[in-house]
Image: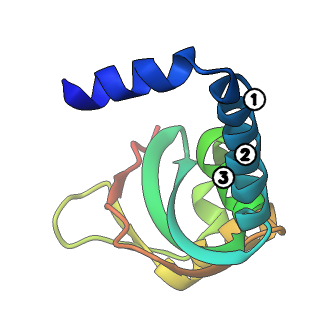
């Protein structure tokens, strides 16, 4: 509570009328500057294979702007057919398939050329019903 009362007292001074907006502007500029650096982060990507939606965690490298955009703004799913990926029949189920991670990594890289996809995490098996 003492901290809040000190902040309130600071706000009553004339200097605080200039200081607080300048502090906020400097923080914003610092944050924008930091986004121009290159970072490595884990980004969830949504892939639809034959209508089945799977979420794949990708380790990607890009500028902070690009990583921020892909994580929060550019969240479009990548639509694929089973023939577009290297898929092997699973031993678990009759209509289950295991997707090759390297193939999926290359496809995600092609669809997101502004990211350098380093690796993809474990991909769940997909079930495709034959008609």
Q: In this view, does 8 lie to the left or right of 14?
A: left
Between circles 3 and 1, the one closer to the viewer is 1
Real-space CA distance between mark 1 and mark 2, rounded to the nearest whole angstrom: 16 Å
Q: Which colour scheme is used?
A: rainbow
Eye-nearest disc, 3 or 2: 2
Disc 3 and disc 1: Cα gap in Å?
A: 31 Å
Q: Indicate the quadrant where residue 130 lies.
A: top left
Q: Is mark 2 on a helix, strand or loop?
A: helix
Mark 3–mark 2 Cα distance, whole angstroms, equals 15 Å
Residue hosting label 2: 28
Residue 41 versus residue 122: which sits nearer the camera? 41
Picture residue at 31% right of the left edge, 54% below the top: 95
Residue 18, label in figure: 1
Q: Is the residue marked by circle 1 packed among few (<14), some (14-19), or many (20+) residues within 10 Å?
A: few
Q: Which of marks 3 and 2 is nearer the N terminus?
A: 2
Whole-percent x and y of residue 58?
51, 69
> Could you tell whether 65 is left or right of 104 in the image?
right
Q: Which of marks 1 and 2 is in front?
A: 1
In the figure, 52 relative to 90: above or below? above
Give the image location of residue 106, x and y in percent.
68, 78
């Amino acid at each position: 509570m003492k901290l809040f009362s000190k902040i309130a007292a600071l706000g009553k001074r004339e200097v605080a009328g200039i200081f607080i907006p300048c502090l906020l502007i400097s923080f914003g500029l610092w944050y924008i500057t930091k986004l121009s650096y290159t970072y490595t982060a884990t980004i969830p990507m949504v892939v639809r294979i034959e209508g089945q939606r799977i979420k794949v965690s990708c380790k990607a490298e890009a500028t902070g702007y690009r990583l921020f955009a892909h994580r929060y703004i550019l969240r479009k799913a990548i639509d694929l057919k089973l023939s577009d990926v290297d898929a092997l029949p699973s031993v678990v189920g009759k209509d289950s398939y295991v997707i090759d991670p390297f193939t999926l990594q290359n496809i995600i890289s092609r669809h997101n050329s502004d990211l350098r996809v380093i690796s993809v995490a474990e991909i769940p098996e997909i079930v495709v019903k034959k008609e």
